[in-house]
Image: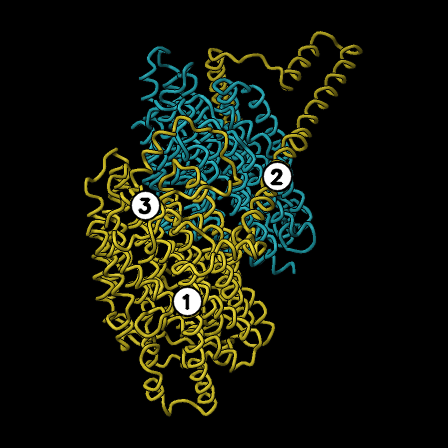
Chain colours: A yellow, B cyan
Amino acid sequence: MVIPLISIILLCPLAAFVIFALLGLAKRSFPRQDLLSTAAMLAALVCSFLLLREVVPDPKPHTVNWISVGDFTFSMGFYLDSVTVIMLIVVTLVSSLVHIFSIGYMHGDPRYPRFFAYLSLFSFSMLFLVVSDNLLGIYIGWELVGLCSYLLIGFWFEKDSAANACKKAFLTTRVGDVGMFIGMMMLFAKFKTLSLYDGTENGIFTLVEGLSGTGDIIWLSIAGILIFCGAIGKSAQVPLHTWLPDAMEGPTPVSALIHAATMVAAGVYLTARMFPILTDTSSLVIAYIGGITALVAATIAIVRFDIKRVLAYSTVSQLGYMMLAIGAGSYVAGLFHLTTHAFFKALLFLGSGSVIHAFHAMHAHHDEDHTDGEAHEHDDHSLVHEHGSEIPPDQDMRNMGGLRRKMPWTFGTMLVATLSISGVPFLFSGFWSKDAILGGVLGHAMVSHSPHYYILFGMALIAAGITAFYMFRLIFMTFFGEPRNQEMHDMAHESPWVMVVPLLVLAVLSIPIVNPIWFNKDYVKPPPQSHIHAPAHAQLGPDTKTGDANSGFAFFWISEAQAAEEEGGKNTEKADDAYRIHKLAHNIAMVLSICVAGLGILLSWLFYHRRRFSAESVATKFSPVYNLFWNKYYFDEFYDGVLVALTVWKSRLFAQFDGAIVDGTVNGVGTVTRQIFAAFIGFFDNRVVDGIVNRVAEVTWAAGGRIRRIQTGAIQTYLFVVLGGIVLIILIFRAL
Amino acid sequence: MLLSLMIFVPLLGMIVVLLLPRESEELIKRVTLAFTLIPLILAVYLYITHNQPDLEHLWKQNVPWIATFNIQYHVGIDGLSAILILLTALLGPICVLASWRNIEKGIKAYMALFLLLETGMLGFFAALDLFLFFVFFELTLLPMYFLIGVWGGPRREYAAIKFFLYTLFGSVLMLVAIIAVYLNSNVINGIAAEARTFDIPTLIERAATEGHALANGTFQMWVFLGFFIGFAVKVPIFPFHTWLPDAHVEAPTAISVILAGVLLKMGTYGLVRINMDMLPEGMAFFTNGAGFWGNSLALLGFINIVYGSFCALAQTDFKKLVAYSSIGHMGFVILGLAAGNEVGVTGAILQMFNHGVISAMLFLLVGVLYDRAHHREINGFGGLGNRMPIYTGITTLAFMASLGLPGLSGFIGEAFSLLGAYERFPTLAILSTIGIVVGAAYFLWTLQRVFLGTLNPKYEALPEINRREILTLVPLGILTIVLGIWPHFAIEMFSESVVELTTKIMGTLQANL
């Protein structure tokens, strides 16, 4: 049943897109593309749930030969383990809800059918990425989701900001992708395959176990980091994170689906998948990138006023957490946070979409486009983007306030998500996954005695506090207090049910007790991944337990004692030690994370609700720090001012070199030759014969570029002569 | 027999067209279309039956031609030539359709020359006699010169002469190399032992025989250089490339399509057929990875990729941009061939075919826009996405294919060339990936400047792409998608040839180490 189910999952959304494309070619469009795409997605969702039953402990990939020449073969195929299924469910579930939400949100858009077709194409690509069993297949899906992201960020391409943002997103992620490709080249050169699992041939994960010696490990570290470069781009990690906030130019449902829940999480998924080849060094690099990202993005989020940008930086920060978890060896915790984050962050984005919609964002948007279209200047497109673009009024939190009475459902659901992301204990999913990460990092630090991981734990903890602070800042500014813009406030209204229902579903999914996905521990378990080069804890800690079937996502909310009981007696003494340390670490981390979350919420409440302190005065007091945050650490300035400018300058230089030097040389040689010939012939002309040589000179001159206008009539005669000549030559030579 | 039919049907068509009255333009176009469709039908038949060994005899012919010099009319195909013949036969009718409305003067002469050109191209890919090979090589030059020089843009005469002289320069060196091969073709251990020959399979065999004059390493190296420069002009390889942007900018749409789609492939085809297959020792000298000369071929591939991509980024003329992007993409072919291993050569050959299809699409698309707006200045457009959604969609597809988006055919050629090259020339392969990023940059920047943003009021009435134009693009678009998903359809054609060739190259490299 695996193959047919996966085929349906992939083909349904693809078909929805293909129908749109084919009809589009015939200048038609299907009247209810929205329903078609949504139905396709729901079908995929049902099949994903059915696949839960097909998970077996030690799965084999289902492959076909894709390309084979001589000795080398590339196969394409599916690999279905519990992680795949979880990802499939997350993607199809969020995608279905976003489809439904979009029916309301995108209503009235002139390119309404196209939006759904793009969503379908995206869903297909994302699902393809998830089920692929080899790096080449993952790379294909990887780039296709990038294309869809490009198309959807630039969906309102009449806006220059959107047109710039989509280009930036594609190019920035491509820089990372090139790194990933180089990593793939290294692995291919070594292993002669890009398959990850054992199918008809040995996969990379088996072959990597056969490696030994330190020499191998250095190149493997480099390869691992290069592959991770792809994830840095796609998951918007520092230093390639700048595209994601700009990507908020896309319609909000797109931000929810692609730039919060699924595509950006693909980097985390990839890194977790590649866990068996990650060495100590590459793990540490990943952990640092993740930790720095988590902290940097959180600090930027504090000072943003655009509701979507706050969420965007929050996404970047949370993705950093996931990377940090993988880098610390707790890749299950990373994946766990991926799933919880997918739901609550999608909810936050859709909620913000609901708010924006309430302000009649859509209509204002398009009216604006049509009116100022004519006055538009056309020569301002350049590779260098402009900054400090105005925040659209319907996304500016300074225009909001007091919306909780107007939009009770939106407020209530967003509050659940905010409690979840802030790590408010026990009832909300985010608490469990964040605690798993913090505990994992601290545990790793304690087991390995590595100061690096203590530092990282500190960074993650600070970031957790900041997260709680800025998320409640968002809630207070949007939903509490008095309306700041009465005119807009009066227009606001609760969204239609087609938008509210997805919010409710996502809110329910953010509460673990009622969320079946990580409830059922039989189905949800980490894949058996032996990890030979990685830190010892990866094999010993409670997170992976060398692929023991009993631990899993379920672990994180089932009480620790219960998990310990299940594991009892199976581990060696050393493992027991490590396990005890990890348990301790989890308890410490839990207490600390509750404290920092509480502190963050308290400060936020004092600043933005009770107004005991003024954010403005703090900002002026610490203006250098504030400016740094406000200007996003000047990453964009550096890229546009230095890297992009340098590239453009270099290209102009090349082009000038091409015209002046290379072509100039060619023309020069031509001229010189012509003159030498002319001079030579002139000399010859004077001394030897006059009449005949004159003709030759003329011909030479002609060849040098002074040919007279060629008349078409002459060509026909000419062709007949050529034809006659060919016939004659053939006949003569045949006779010889 | 069928092969000869395929080669000479367009020539027959040329005669028919020349006999038709000048005024009946519609008839001329239809006749031309019919005569280009016949090779296409034959090529499709060839594709369908290519793995039936009992039909092989249909696709070769060997009769004496000029007995004095032992020159034969010897044509035949293997996987590599078959796939390029397919490409040529496919682009033939597409180009005729693309010329349907926008050739204003002398349609008769134009079509006649086009048919002559097609014979030249098909013959070149099928020729198995070095002399015949050269004759067909030169035969494409002549009609191309007139097609650019008469029907081209404002600087057509300059461009045509430049194209002509460049290629002539290369082919003179090639002719010297051919004569050198011919004169040495009968010498074993210093004694003239057998009859001289131009026959390529025989020459390949002799060049692999111990003690044969053709097998001498130094001899092969020099002959390699002669052929190489001849082909390098065609590919074009830096620094012999400057004719290409000029020729493309001035040439009419359909001729640009042929130029990028087929003529460039004549260069790389020659490299595989002669330089690699016949002169493995020479090939080994330039690709053994030792010192400057041992890296030179891969280095040229790398330079083409990076140099072409950066030059493309600086262009503001749409057609010139596509022309420079071709230089970059042909660099991947050179890189893959330099690798000499199965992955690399497979990638290179795939890239030849796919670049033919994709660049044909790109030039057709530029032509569609030029026919409407009468200029090609990228910055002069803007916001066409709303005005011409179908055109925008097809252009996006072609751009994405060209910048190597996985799932479309452009990716696999590039990826395999790089994967193969990494094994032999890791540093150059890694540096070449710069081209992937820059490639994405210039295409996306172009997309933005032409299609995104607000609509330029000048083009509010620009008509959408019409049905005939869609018809020229759809087959190519389908090929890009199908070969992107299932490249095996193309690879199975030539995989045996590649295995044979790479075994020889790698063997020679091993022996020289």
Q: Earlier in the sequence, mark 2 or mark 1?
A: 1
Query: Mark 2–mark 1 contact, CB under 8 Å?
Result: no
User: How many residues crowd around disc 1 within 10 Å: few (fewer than 14), some, or many (20 or more)?
Assistant: some
Quickly name the residue at label 3.
Answer: B49
Q: Residue furthest right?
A: A687
Q: Which mark is residue A649?
A: 2
- The amino acid on which the numbered mark 2 sits, given as a three-letter code, is Trp
Quickly name the residue at label 1.
Answer: A602
- Name the residue located 33 percent from the left edge and 24 percent from the top edge: B463
Cα separation between marks 2 and 1: 51 Å
Marks 2, 1 in one chain: yes
Marks 3, 2 in one chain: no
Q: Position of residue A413 (x, y in %)?
A: 27, 60
- Which mark's residue is nearer the viewer, 1 or 3? 1
Cα separation between marks 1 and 3: 77 Å
Cα separation between marks 3 and 2: 52 Å
- The amino acid on which the numbered mark 3 sits, given as a three-letter code, is Thr
- The amino acid on which the numbered mark 1 sits, given as a three-letter code, is Leu
User: How many residues crowd around disc 2 within 10 Å: few (fewer than 14), some, or many (20 or more)?
Assistant: some
Image mark 1: chain: A
